[in-house]
């Protein structure tokens, strides 16, 4: 069965990149899409394969971008149809001259996580969630296209992206806000304010949320003992993990596992 979901921003976001909508779809074999948009449209492939412009075959971890006014044509593979996420957005500039192109994520899991979080935020349809979703849009486009100057605030998004990447690579260690800011070389107070402005959440909350979501996935998808899950997401002190997990999810880790089994 073909699964489709798409969410629209309830009000324009204020940024060099302005988010319109985002969605996700598991396509049927040979499903084809054609059309023209008056804004940028970016697709990121989660799994499976498909062809763009009737020729180039793309797979998991790869992306393609269409600029405004460009005729589009892309279709799912007949044997292994793709599942992808997409983002429709506007740019106050020319997106650094980026043309219709193909891009590969250096870290597919990180980009996939950003897409999941963006779509989740946009589904909430609040001003705060749109700001957070726009922060993920900036990270995604900057990571895939590799042109940080498309982002507002000069070099600021470079630091934000570096902090997010550091968290994603080191969440299992005993890191905190001080560790992150020391890694990127900025004053803690300054960067905490910058991160909140870019991402719509505090640095410590982002770290905690990422750890708890990772813990939830481990609880649902593995049979690791709960204490081992706690240690795997940076909590060697199990009681501290247990309190934090219940505060975030409303249930204990053991109850969460039973609910997901």
Image (cartoon, rainbow, N blue to C red):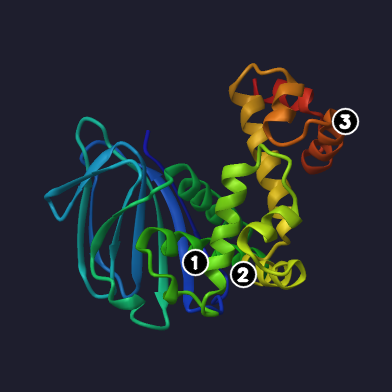
- The quadrant of the picture occupied by the C terminus is top right
Are the residues at dot 1 and dot 3 in contact (C-beta closer than 8 Å)?
no
Using residue 32 as the reference point, say whether residue 137 is left or right of it. right
For the point 79% across and 37% down, which residue is it? Answer: 245
Residue behind mark 3: 239
Find residue 199 and report its horizontal and vertical position in percent: 63, 65
Find residue 192 and report its horizontal and vertical position in percent: 72, 67
For the point 82% across and 29% down, which residue is it? Answer: 252
For the point 31% across and 40% down, which residue is it? Answer: 82
Instruction: Tell me if mark 1 has few (under 14), some (14-19) or many (20+) residues whose alpha carbon lies within 10 angstroms of its own.
Output: many
Of the two numbered discs 3 and 2 on the same chain, state the one appearing first in sequence: 2
| Residue 31, numbered circle | none
Say what secondary structure mark 2 lies in.
Answer: helix
Find residue 149 and report its horizontal and vertical position in percent: 43, 76
Say what secondary structure mark 1 lies in.
Answer: helix
Mark closer to the observer (1, 3): 3
Residue behind mark 2: 198
Using residue 136 as the reference point, say whether residue 247 is left or right of it. right
Residue behind mark 1: 138
- CA gap, disc 1 to disc 3? 36 Å
For the point 19% across and 34% down, which residue is it? Answer: 78
Of the two numbered discs 1 and 2 on the same chain, state the one appearing first in sequence: 1
Are the residues at dot 1 and dot 2 in contact (C-beta closer than 8 Å)?
yes
Between 107 and 77, the one nearer to me in the picture: 107
């Amino acid at each position: 069965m073909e699964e489709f979901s798409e969410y629209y921003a309830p009000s324009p976001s204020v940024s060099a990149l302005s988010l319109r909508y985002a969605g996700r779809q598991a396509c049927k074999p040979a499903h084809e899409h054609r059309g023209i948009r008056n804004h940028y449209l970016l697709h990121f492939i989660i799994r499976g394969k498909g062809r763009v412009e009737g020729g180039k075959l793309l797979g998991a971890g790869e992306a393609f971008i269409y600029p405004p006014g460009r005729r589009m044509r892309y279709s799912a593979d007949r044997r292994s149809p793709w599942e992808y996420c997409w983002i429709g957005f506007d740019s106050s500039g020319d997106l650094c001259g980026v043309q219709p192109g193909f891009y590969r994520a250096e870290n597919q899991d990180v980009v996939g996580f950003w897409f999941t979080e963006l779509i989740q935020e946009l589904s909430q349809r609040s001003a705060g969630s749109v700001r957070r979703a726009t922060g993920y849009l900036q990270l995604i486009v900057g990571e895939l296209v590799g042109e940080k100057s498309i982002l507002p605030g000069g070099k600021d998004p470079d630091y934000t992206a570096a902090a997010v990447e550091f968290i994603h690579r080191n969440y299992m260690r005993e890191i905190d806000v001080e560790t992150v800011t020391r890694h990127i070389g900025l004053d803690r107070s300054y960067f905490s304010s910058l991160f909140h402005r870019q991402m719509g959440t505090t640095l410590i909350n982002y770290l905690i949320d990422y750890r708890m979501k990772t813990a939830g996935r481990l609880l649902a998808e593995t049979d690791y003992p709960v204490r081992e899950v706690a240690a795997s997401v940076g909590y060697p002190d199990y009681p501290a993990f247990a309190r934090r997990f219940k505060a975030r999810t409303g249930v204990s880790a053991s109850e969460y596992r039973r609910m997901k089994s």
